[in-house]
Each structure stands twice: as C-alpha cells, then as structure tokens.
Amino acid sequence: LIMLDHPPITPCRGAHPGELSGDMARVYDLVVRHFIATVSRDADWCSTKVELEVKALEEHGKFTIRGKQLVSPGFLAILLHKDYENEQSDPNEIDDNEEEEKVLPEFVEGEEVTLSSPNSGSGKVSTVTSTCATDGRATLAIKEKMTTPPSLLSESELITLMEKNGIGTDASISTHIENILKRNYVSLVSGRRLEPTKLGLVLAQGYHLIDSSLVLPQVRASIEGECNKIAKGLASKETVVQKALNFFQGKFTFFVENIAKMDMLFGSSFARLEDVGKPFSRCGLTRRYLQLILGPPPRLYNKFTETVYALPCGGTAKQWTGKKCPVPDCDFELCLYTVGSPSRTYPLCPNCFNTSKEDLNNDEADNRVDDNDAIHELKLHRLAGRTLTLACPLPDRHPAIAEMAVMQDKESGGLFILDPTSLGSKWRLVSTRSPSVMHLPQGTEKVTLLDRIDDETGCHYIQIDFKEDKIPLQDGCAKRICYLPKDEPMLAAIRTFRGSETPKASNRRGTGGRGGGRRGGRGFRRG
C-alpha cells in the first residue's frame, strides 16, 4: 500500500458513548468522519445536459439545461453533506453553467417544445414537467446580472493550481504558501483566501516587465521535472545541476542589466502622492485614471493594477477630449503628443504605443524572427527613455491615424493628417513621418473630414469652409469639397514648411545671438 497523501489528523481509537460531550464531541465527530471519508469510495453522479435552440433568435438562440442525480453517495453518506462541490464563499459567484442537483424530464433529439411566458421572475430557461416526461412546454425569459471579478484563490485552490502546473511537492507546497505570507506578497483574508498585496503586485509586474518566465509556472515546472528524472534514474544529478546553473546565470545577468525598470516601477508605486502626479487619461481595462509621471522618462501609471505605460520621449503628452482608441478591445483614452519645431501634434494611445507590433512603420519589423521579443525589447528601451520619438508615435495603419488622413506624404512615405489642435484661422496638415507642415489659406474657417475615402490611398475627402470676405480661390465659392491631392488650385494656395527633427530645447537661448532664430529665412515654400 502506497500512501502519497495523508489526512492531517488520524483518530487513534473509537470513543465510547457518553465519553465526550459538547465541542469535544463535535470536533471528534468531524475528524473521524473526514478520516473515514478519505478511505471511502467516490460518490457517483449522473449528469445530463440538454441543448435547446430557438430558431427565431438565430445565433443568439442557443440555450442549455443541466442537471445531475446522485447514483451512489459513497463518502458523502459519511460526511452527511447534501452537496460536495467547490466551496463558494459568496452565493452570487455561482456560475449559471454549473449543474444543479435535479432530475430533468426525458427529451428526444430533434423534439420541438412550445415556449410560453414565465410565471416568475427567475429569468432562467426552465421546463414545465410532469411526473414522467415532458409535456412539450417551456418558459424563456431574460435574466439580468452584473459581471463580477474572479474571486480570490483560497489556499486549497492555490495548492490545486500548483499541483496542476507541476510546481512543488507534497512536502514543499505548504512552505511556498507560508513564504509568500511571511514576505507580505499576499495576505490571508476571510474564508482563508489569499489577497495579493501592493508589494506582491508590483513585484510580479516588475518580473513580467523584465522577464515574464520568472513568474510563469513553466520554468519552475521544468526544474521539478528534471529533479524527477534524477529520482527515476533518467538523468544524473551533476548534469541537472549544471544545466540549471547555466540557465539561471543567463536569467540573472539579463535581470541585473534591466534592474532599472524594476526600480522605476517601485518608484512609481511607492512614491508619495504629490510625486506621482495627477490623473491624466482613463485606462481601457479598468476605466480608472492613469497617473502622469513626468519622469524622466515620462510614463503613465495605473495604481490599481501596478502597470506602467511608457510615453514617447522627445515631445510632450497632453490631455485631449476623452475620445477612446478605435482599436477593438482597447478603449484606452486617447491623448495628444506634440513634438518638433514647428510643433506637430498627433493622436496617442498609451496602450497601442506600448503593444504595437509596428515600430513606427519600420520595414525591419516585418523581418524579425520573434515579434514578441522585439516588442518586449522596444518596450524596455521606451521605459528607459532610450528611444526618441520625433514623429507620429502610432503607425500609419492605426485607425486613429487612418481616420484623420488627408493625403500621402510621398517624400517620407508617411501621411498628412489634419492637426487635431487646428481651430480658428490656423488650419494645417502635419506629416506623420517628417517635420513637414502644410498651412491652409488664412481665409479657412473650418475643415471637415468626410466619410468618403479614396479607394487607392485610403485618404479622406475634406470639406473646406472659407470666410466670406477672405475666399482665397478665384471661383469665389465659400465651401469646397475636394480630394486634396487632385485639387490643383487648392494645393497652389497651401504653404508647405519643412521644420527640424531636433527636439525643442526648453529654457535655453539660441546659439545665434540676438535674433539668431530667424537666420536662414522663414523656411516657407509654395506648394
């Protein structure tokens, strides 16, 4: 007989009637019943699942009914439990897909049942049954519920996950849980559930930022697997130890080289409130405000998830109108990024800037062997402030850029988009990949991007409204709808200016002496 696990308390002898009373009797009864249950037969259930389809609702008309019936009680008869399912600390956490202990009526595949209005407000799909079989009637109603976050893991659930992922042994698992409690990575709350502390969250996020494998179960599971090979005689101890040392030496070296990212995350998380900054824009995942940390390097910090989003270096990030990122499932609030001289302003999504697979439309990005490693390396450089962003921080194919595109910039391979800060009499187009700016005529009162798009370039038609007393074109029309690249009169009235890609210095005088900033002419040329 091989005993892999053992009950924590084993009764040594039976108690005679009347020998124990009160709490002592209840504790003894609980211990003995659990001990006998561990060596008893399993409980057998008969589960039934019925799938119903309402044709009138098409793809939304698929429903299921689940039920189960106890066939053999097994150890449940000893524990005197009516149910022996996963513990639920909150009844609201019960999943609608879980099976209830009930007997379903007999159904035949392909059978049609008639729907009727429900008599109660339960909102579940239910069948009206007789004592032996269905009479062909069912009720259908809508059940409204609020989504809830996943519940915290209990100690037993954590042990189950560790065993499932091959982490630890029967003797060491309890030590792991004890260690994370001692080190204040988690705290034990009601129901013996483990709640991550701020320190634990920041530490895990820091490891993910530098090397995710250090906090994912695969590395630890592989080491456990190598140790099992030693126990089975499939590998020598020396080979396994040397392999592990070489592996972790590389991990350690890489971690030390990038430890500044961990310091920056801890600095963001544990700084004083006045040092963290003010709410800047909303996170698309939590709908909470991200805190702006000016740095250097500049970044946004979510104090609820302990996540840091790098902002582009070389310019200035500003709040916008609260517009959300149009990328599906992103929903981060867009902000503005201003860079260069003359200043050019572009839309910026903090999430897409940190996760985009395109490094500012660099063709080399498509030739990289491992996109995930390239993105991770780029993110580390951005968080460290090593990468200057002197053009549009989002790729031209990003929906927030494409929906503002007016014409192609053939010199740089980018796009001319409508400057999101244009208003009044200063309407202009800015290039996404060069310091070029196109100034519309002074009489321009308003520019509207139309839904109509050129099939070849994907750029928008625009409507230009002129002031009645300052119409710049000879036709005298105060309203003009055009596709700008093909409107020669309009192009002739536009002034194009090519500026500098050098970031604008702050609090410094020019080196050309008094008036030196004007040297070299104004830089305008006619389009």
Image (tube, rainbow, N blue to C red):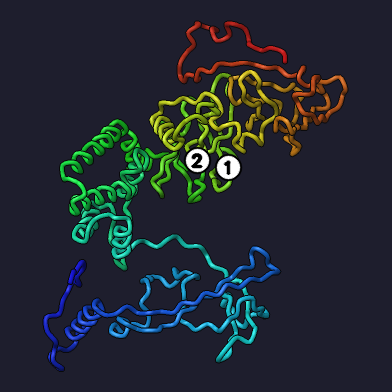
The mark found on residue 325 in the picture is 1
Q: Which residue is mark 2?
A: 351
Q: What amino acid is found at the position of numbered circle 1 in the picture?
A: Cys
Q: Position of residue 85 (x, y in %)?
A: 37, 74
Relative depth, front residue between 248 and 260: 248
Q: Residue furthest front?
A: 234
Relative depth, front residue between 389 and 524: 389
Relative depth, front residue between 274 and 457: 457
Quarter assignment of residue 447: top right
Q: Position of residue 89 (x, y in %)?
A: 37, 70
Residue at position x 49%, y 70% in the image: 97
Q: Position of residue 478 (x, y in %)?
A: 84, 28
Locate residue 315 relative to residue 61 in the image: left or right. left
Residue at position x 64%, y 21% in the image: 437
Image quadrant holding the C terminus, namely top right
Q: Say if residue 418 shows up in the picture.
A: yes
Q: What amino acid is found at the position of numbered circle 2 in the picture?
A: Asn
Locate residue 236 relative to residue 287 in the image: left or right. left
Residue at position x 66%, y 78% in the image: 112
281 in relation to 75, above or below: above
213 in relation to 26, above or below: above
Mark 2 touches mark 1? (CB < 8 Å): yes
Quarter assignment of residue 113: bottom right
